Image: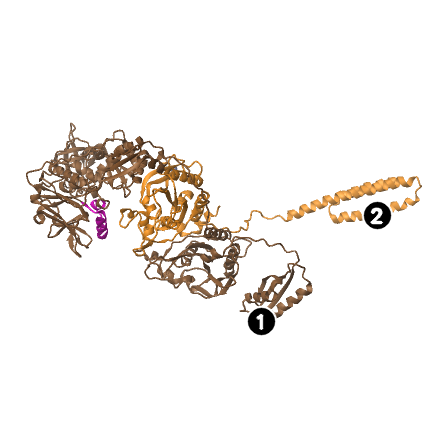
Amino acid sequence: MKEQLEALKLEALKELESVNDSKTLNDFRVKYLGKKGPLTEILRGMGKLSNEERPVIGQVANEVRSAIGNAIQSKQDEISRKELENRLKEETIDITLPGRKPTQGAIHPLNKVIQDIEDIFVGMGYTVEEGPEVEKDYYNFEALNLPKDHPARDMQDTFYITEEFLMRTHTSPVQIRTMEAKKGEVPIKIICPGRVYRRDDDDATHSHAFTQIEGLVIDKNVRMSDLKGTLLQFVQEMYGKDTQIRLRPSFFPFTEPSAEVDITCANCKGDGCRICKQTGWIEILGSGMVHPRVLEMAGYDPNEYSGFAFGMGVERIAMLKYGIDDIRHFFTNDLRFLNQFVRI
Amino acid sequence: MRVSYGWLSEYVDVTGYSASDLAEKLTRSGVEVDIVEKLNQGITNVVVGYVKTCEKHPNADKLSLCTVDVGKEEDLQIICGAKNIAAGQKVPVAVPGAVLPGNFKIKKAKLRGVESYGMICSAKELGMNDRLLPKEIQEGILVLPDDTNVGDDILEVLGLNDEVLELELTPNRSDCLSMIGTAYEIAAILGREVKLPLAEVSSSSTIAADKISVKNLSPENCHHYSARYIEEVSIQPSPLWMQNRLMAAGIRPINNIVDITNYVMLEYGQPLHAFDADQLNEGHIEVRLAEKDEKMTTLDEVERTLEESMLLITDGTKPVAIAGVMGGANSEVQAETINILLESAKFSGSSVRITSKKLGLRSESSLRFEKEVNPENVTAALNRAAVLLSQYANGKVADGIVEELSVQNPATNIEISLRKVNDYLGTDLSKEDVKHVFDRLHFSYTETDESNVVVHVPSRRGDITRDVDLIEEVARIHGYDHIPTSLMVGVTTPGSLTKEQKIRRAIRRILTDEGLHEVINYSFTHPSQIKLFPGMYAESKHVKLALPMSEERSTLRTSLIPHLLDVAAYNNNRNQADVRIFETGRVFLTEEETLSRLPEEKELLSILLTGKRETAHWSVQENKVDFYDLKGHVETLFEYLGIIGLEFVSASPNGFHPGRTASIQINTGEQNIELGWIGQLHPSIQQEKDLEEVYILEIALEEVYKLSSFDIEYVSLPKYPAIGRDIAIVVGQTLQIGEIVNSIKETAKELLESVSVFDIYTGEKVSSGKKSVALSLTYRHNERTLTDEEVTELHSKVVEEIEKSFNAELRK
Ligand SMILES: [Zn+2]
């Protein structure tokens, strides 16, 4: 009987080798381990055995049963693994097809640059002031030390509405309005972004409407060296820590001394290239110490207070920053242009 | 101002500095040099030749065969095509091996069988600007004066071995509109001295006052009028060197008299005028304002109608010049002129400016007067011109100056303290440093005490009137590079954006996150665009520019929509059919036809959607945007901005599709505030703009800013379960579902947590004129679990109310 059991085990294990799917495996289990299977039959015949033989054979029979059982289990695992593999293979998709992209719009590059500049100055303790685009001659010119028929008015060709009202030619009137509203209080630390207008024919570098950001600081003991320090800090945050500035004497009716401000060319790092016309420097700002006449007219005693002001063209900054070659792009709003500013 | 380097070096020693060195130094100290122009343009080997013989070319009618002495052993045989060539002339000759402008190389050549060794040149061929050439030498070869030396380098003869610095002057530096003024600036930068030109007049025995007289009837417009009388001038071309300098400065030589007045103007910055004295009534000059509609013919042969504000020079009987702007044809110096009245005056800058603007006449003279000439130069320039007239026109200068001086030049003395200089600039200069700057500028000064000096500002620097102007001079000459950088002392201030600025940024961020692009449009528009789409402020009058550059940009916008439509059309025409854009910008409103106060500037938000809803994708069906896409943007935006009470009310304003438009309102509990409109663009405008279906929105931001809130108040999460019930009903097709929703809310009250529409159907399965609507309701109590019976009872009330109010039929 022992031999019979061993033979059964061998036979079963041999047959199991050719089983390859869950169904056949189940049939196999029923065939060998089921109630009508040969093992059950053999065990039934155990009653005829002697008392000595019975535990020995019983042990052998259990060993055979568990050997077959274990073999079935490992076969089962193998089949499940294969079946899963096959299913996953069938589920394969074409990952080269394009994804469904949520669309992302872009803030207009001019506003993006304004926001960047605002953030830098807000970080330096400034507030942001705004004012009307249609202005009084007084705020746009006279209060800025540009009386009627002053030759310097030629520097800015103006769109007049009436003799008294005009499209502001710079955001400087916001400075005057802020000073008037502050009624002699200090400190004033503001920047004023906004749209301005000049009688210019539109071309690649001129626009009848463009955007400015100006800054104004008024306090006791404000020095020209503070202006230099402030602008240096600004350009280094805007253009990188290596950026240097250079001030050149200039003239604005509302500042004295006045200075044009150049920064080292970001393209060539000062070596000279096409963009900076081989000078290594690029002009980006006008600035100066607030003219005492402007302080006086706005109600600040120039013997007690001093201040500085600066201004820049946002289009120019954006054109330099992004390498845009035509100012008209900003106002044409071609989606192929706008789409390029989606990135943060 | 065009400054000849060679000429400049007569007034200040520039040894050791090239023209471009000077340009760099000037630019860095505040006088910007635009370009440095080399006048020689690459010319080599062009010399003065003497035409010994000139005969007809044996084989060509229009060519001449010349023998030319160029100072070498052998004469050259040269063929020349110019009509004006003749034996005995001195001419510029490009010898074989010469180079002309444009790298044009001269070789020996054979012309119609005859050898030609070089070329006789015209002024144009030498690269000279023909606009500046005297008329008689614009055509043909350039004939040089007889006293020119044969064999001399033409570059020397014509002053072309020179460079010109073109100054881009700011309005305050009119002192540099003169060679002497520029020389002072260079002297200050280089620390050198200025040499002034010779102005010692030797007079004849004639007494000027016997011949001429001056009367100034307008002392407020003419501060100083001075004149000299010069007899028996001989009119001829001015010397070549003078012509060369005038041309280098951009002025065309005319004759010796006119050239001398221009030359002295360039030297001193003081415009002069020469009258033919015999054309003046008894040599009299009377300065007065013009009469209304008075007429005179100016030098350019144009008859001008004058206004009462214009200052005239007359001879007591007729106008002979418009003061400071242009002379009259009737008293012009001509070939026959014998005696001259030479004028040197100081007219008020604003008077000349207004006149020249009104007449549209700007001249070298007017642009100098406009910026106020140096009063001290009135006499100096007059004398200098008299010297040159006796030298180069053989004139006899009568004794004395005839003048009327009505406004004395006040001395400008400014006290300045060392402390103020250093406090203002943030520098640490010593008194010696500061004095050194004034020495270099040739400003004299008096030391009042340890730290103060009184600076006596010379009259050439009329721009310096206050201590800060002197501080600028110190900074500029000391060098802006030497000003340190510092951080402000004093109170630190917190920086921040206002609520409005933060919300504007939030709107930009929300809308761009939803895929919309921000655009920026001009404020100016065509009046027809306002008419086409009046927008919310149709009752506003329009703000118009006084002198627009075009009708297209003549009027300030009252709505942002027309430009957005143009942007959509622009992009559609470039194969970009899907346009989703927004703009925040200002419109300009007024109740007045002519402004007497500032217009109201309202900030608006406008959105435009057209084209497909989704980005094209192989798995997505293409749907066009509709009203609900735009409405969704508004709903999300207001949710994010913390604005509650948003309501849409049917409306049919101008410019919109009457059945697909709503007024956007905020119900504050007390009142409804209208913010703007949302809807489909009216199909007729759509057609006019050649667009597909367009959805637009325009709202005023002022109220949005007020109503927005960034405050977040946490509401605890529900502890008790919700119970859901659905309703399916059939109602009339035109019934607005919002009415059903409102009815549900009113009936169910606070136990209703939410209600949403999940299906709308019209078609075969419902009878015509009807639609089937499916709604999903969620009930919840915040403090306990609702029972099924409770909800069933409440829900049947809700259903009953709907059935009753809307004649609805319940679908089972
Ligand atoms: Zn560069």
* Amino acid tagged 2: Gly
Q: Which residues are magenta?
A: B346-367
- For the residue with label 1, is its CB less than 8 Å from the closest atom of ligand 1? no
Percent coordinates x, y for residue A174 in the rendering: 38, 50
Q: Which residue is mark 1?
A: B805
Q: What's the residue at 93%, 39% (across, down)?
A: A52
Percent coordinates x, y for residue A219 in the rendering: 39, 43
Query: What secondary structure is marked by label 2?
Result: loop
Quadrant of residue B457 within the rendered picture = top left
Specify the farthest residue to the front: B449
Query: What secondary structure is marked by label 1?
Result: helix
Chain ID, mark 2: A
Question: Which residue occupies the foreground of this view, B78 or B315?
Answer: B315
Q: Which residue is mark 2?
A: A37
- The chain coloured orange in the image: A
The span from disc 1 to disc 2 (Cα, nearest Å) is 76 Å
- The chain coloured brown in the image: B
Question: Which residue occupies the foreground of this view, B266 or B628?
Answer: B266
